[in-house]
Amino acid sequence: MDILNALVAFLNFVFIPAAAYGAQLALGALGVTLIYGILRFSNFAHGDTMAFGTAITILTTWGMQSLGISLGPLPTALLALPVGIAATALLVLGTDRAVYRFYRVQKAAPIIFVMASVGVMFVMNGLTRLVIGVDEQRFDDGARFIIAVRDFREWSGLAEGLALRSTQALTVVVTAIVCAALFWFLNRTKAGKAMRAYSDNEDLALLSGIDPERVVRLTWIIAAALMTIAGVLYGLDKSFRPFNYFQILLPIFAAAIVGGLGSPVGAIAGGFLVAFSEVAVTYPWVKVAGYLFPGWEPGGLLQLLGTEYKFAVSFVILIVVLLFRPTGLFRGKSV
Amino acid sequence: MSSNRQAAASSPWRAPILFAVLAILFVLEGTVRNGLFSGSWNTALAILNMGLISAITALGVNMQWGYAGLFNTGVVGFLAIGGLAPVLVSLPPVEGAWAAGGPRLIGSLLVGLGTLALAKIVYTRTRRAWAVALVLIAGFVAYRWLFDPAVSAIEANDSARTGNIGGLGLPVLLSWLVGGAFAAAAAWAVGKVALGLRSDYLAIATLGIGEIIVAVLRNEDWLARGVKNVASIPRPVPYEIDLQQNPAFVDFAGRWGLGVAEASGIWVKLCYLSLFLVVLLAIILLAQLALKSPWGRMMRAIRDNEVAAEAMGKDVTARHLQIFVLGSAVIGIAGAMMITLDGLMAPNGYNPLRYTFLIWVMVIVGGSGNNWGSVLGAILIWFLWIKVEVWGPNLIGVLVGPLPDGDIKAHLLGSAPHMRFIAMGLVLLLVLRFAPRGLVPEK
């Protein structure tokens, strides 16, 4: 039994990728949950808006690279991020003014909002294609690895290597900072408290003099920032393909619902839960098992589900939550 | 929802006039050759055939949305699972595939379903999570033990040409009904879980099942060869090549003054057209009768005020499940028809933007709640979707004509094909906002 090698293999293939992916999902789910809490609908345009923000960031990154600006070991995309956030914020504020405000004034049924968001999704999808095309783009630069496989092997003398890509570490660090800032904002500032009050009870918030349009604007701006950051981190870690951003919608929704729609803590927990289950279920465990039980020949990959079915994992989690606890782990909204 | 369904008087001539406009568009497409139209009856009929299939899909969606207010975002999945039926029903059996692993495969699928049923029974009887988990784990192990060897055996059997379980060799028209049944079964499973909760949960759950069904078709090679595609699915109509060699047909084409190649293409498309029209009219007839019956009034009452309907003793969730299954069955029939028309099962073609959200644009534009409206919207939007592919680049070419040649001009020209996504999104948003009742409003 070789616990050290098994542990390293587990860290390398399961823990680190899942943590990075979970952080990306958590940021996405935070955006979905905020919009749900304040505007009370599930935003189907979320994934495509993420793609739009990322596309703008990529274009700015390329511009900066051609001017010779760089952040040294960190990816240049971090410098370009504010531009992407600003562009996305303007876009979503424009969409809110042009599309959603009408239905808000009308007090339309939530499903009408969802449908409008599908229209917005189409437009965003087209815009992203227009801006950057449908092909895969890579835009990461700077140092590739914090720990490289070979260095780790030489340092530890183990057979199994460990790699920590800088984008993975960056994702987790940025997510931690963003979450801390968001919770500080929601719990400590006046605007954040106004947002929470509005989310809890619209009418009471109105009575206490909170301007609903201001709360909505603020929500969109924060959501735009979250979407762009999540999209850029996802693009840095994997690579940028607009269609992937449509597909990531399902895990993001699953994360938000598992945590409880409208609950920011739940969104973060849900993101990591979905990511860890997805990676754990689709990872072939035969290598780890080989270290733990040297004499055992399982005669298969010990993979519960092919990687092509990773979306099935989010779906099953979603179904289980809907069956047993429709309001989510952290008691989100039920209406 | 009630806020968007204000009753307003509309001219009884509205629908006939709009259908006449549509007919003129198709006649122009068939006869006039210029920058806007192709002037080929083959193209016009091809668009119309696919438009009719879209119309049937839109009818299914309209049952779910227009009658009951259910938002199904997994249309692509129900179309795809319906498309599986022609492969499994009408293809000739694959030599040796059944012997290689057929019984074992069926056994594994039964074990899988049995495990889920047992887990449900155990949960309702004991309410103990660990017992359910035990049942599920044991069932999963048994399922994989049966399933994996069966699949490898079937896929190894003549893998270059077939490598799948093969069909039953039955008439392809039968598969249309089977396609409906497949989609209905999938819809029942999703609806059972997601209905009765908040309205957007169904939207999210169907989004998931749509993606999963397409992923299954793409990756389960034993079923329909996955991305290796299944070609030459039997046709319910004659083949062009046979017609061209038939002296009677050559004679017939000559009398109409058409080339044999063109005439045979038109003839085949007309045959499909008549089949599709029969299905479409049968479904519309049934749907209209249902809508005018007490059942239809109950459905609309539920849609317009769930609380009141529930107070009147209607089981809202059960009715929703019923209509969701029925609507999905219609979508499944359309999916089987589409694969029959194409003669090809290619899972990579199932794109949610094209097969889910475009159908939604059709329903909303046509007039949700009105069957004729859905048909009109479907054929019109499909026509525009195909033609915009031609018109968009032409238009952009004219617009950027005065610009100097360079990167920007090339980029604009190259991005013209993406314009139709923006156009369709804008159409959906504009109709939803300014004419929420669509072109042909509900009565």
Image (cartoon, coloured by chain):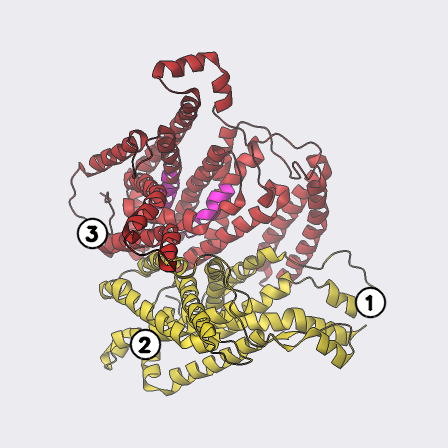
Chain colours: A yellow, B red
**Dot 1: chain letter:** A
Does B221 appear above or below B47? below
**Dot 3: chain letter:** B
Quadrant containing the N terminus of chain B is bottom left
Q: What predominant SS class does the magenta segment belong to?
A: helix
Badge 2 is on which residue?
A218
Q: Secondary structure at mark 2?
A: helix
Q: Secondary structure at mark 1?
A: loop
Residue type marked 1: Pro
The answer to whether the residues at label 1 and label 2 have Cβ atoms under 8 Å apart is: no
Is A32 left, or right, of A110 in this rendering? right
Residue type marked 3: Gln
Give the image location of residue A75, x and y in percent. 52, 76
Nearer to me, A104 or B133: A104
The answer to whether the residues at label 2 and label 3 have Cβ atoms under 8 Å apart is: no
Q: Are marks 3 and 1 on the same chain?
A: no
Q: CA distance from mark 2 to mark 3?
A: 33 Å
Residue B6 bears which disc, if any? 3
